[in-house]
Image (spheres, rainbow, N blue to C red):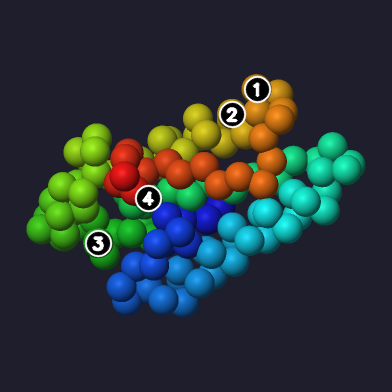
Amino acid sequence: MSSTSGLRPSAGFGAYSIGKAGVIMLTQALASELGKHDIRVNAIAPGPIQTKFSMAITENPETLKELEKHTVLGHIGQPEDIVGAAIFLASDASKHITGQTTVVDGGGFI
């Protein structure tokens, strides 16, 4: 599990962004090494998701409104919004996908 912060750094979250960028590079490295064994390796990069981890941001109505303003769908994600991407990547529907990072952010990265 990575984050959109691993693709574009977030102010004040430098170490977090660096760590999540590392997950993306690890995904690509493992995919290139394990592909010959028919093992696929992919990552999911969520944008803001309303969880306990993000409560400091999402419980502030002004901050939440600002986040939602920068999302094409007009709202931040819920944990269950990640489930579809995870099921897809774990299924045979993605059998020719490896080394990729799937962004799940409601269009916030556009």
Q: Which mark is residue 88?
A: 2
The location of residue 13, given as percent across then percent down, is 37, 73
- For the question of whether residue 90 can be seen, the reply is no
At numbered mark 1, what does the secondary structure look like: helix, strand or loop? helix
Residue at image mark 1: 93
Q: Is residue 82 left or right of residue 68?
A: right
Q: Is residue 88 left or right of residue 75?
A: right
Disc 4 and disc 3: Cα gap in Å? 13 Å
Q: Earlier in the sequence, mark 4 or mark 3?
A: 4
Tell which tag, 3 or 1, sits nearer the viewer. 1
Q: Quadrant of the C terminus?
A: top left
Asked if the residue under mark 4 is in contact with the one under mark 1, i.e. CB atoms within 8 Å, the reply is no
- For the question of whether residue 104 can be seen, the reply is yes
The location of residue 36, given as percent across then percent down, is 88, 43
Amino acid identity at mark 3: Ile
Q: Earlier in the sequence, mark 1 or mark 4?
A: 4
Residue at image mark 3: 57
Q: Nearer the viewer, residue 32 or 70?
A: 32
Disc 3 and disc 1: Cα gap in Å? 35 Å
Q: Is residue 63 left or right of residue 110?
A: left
Disc 1 and disc 2: Cα gap in Å? 6 Å
Q: Earlier in the sequence, mark 3 or mark 1?
A: 3
Amino acid identity at mark 4: Gly
Asked if the residue under mark 2 is in contact with the one under mark 1, i.e. CB atoms within 8 Å, the reply is yes
Q: Which mark is residue 80?
A: none
Q: What residue lies at 59% left-to-right and 29% top-to-bottom?
A: 88
Amino acid identity at mark 2: Phe
Residue at image mark 4: 47
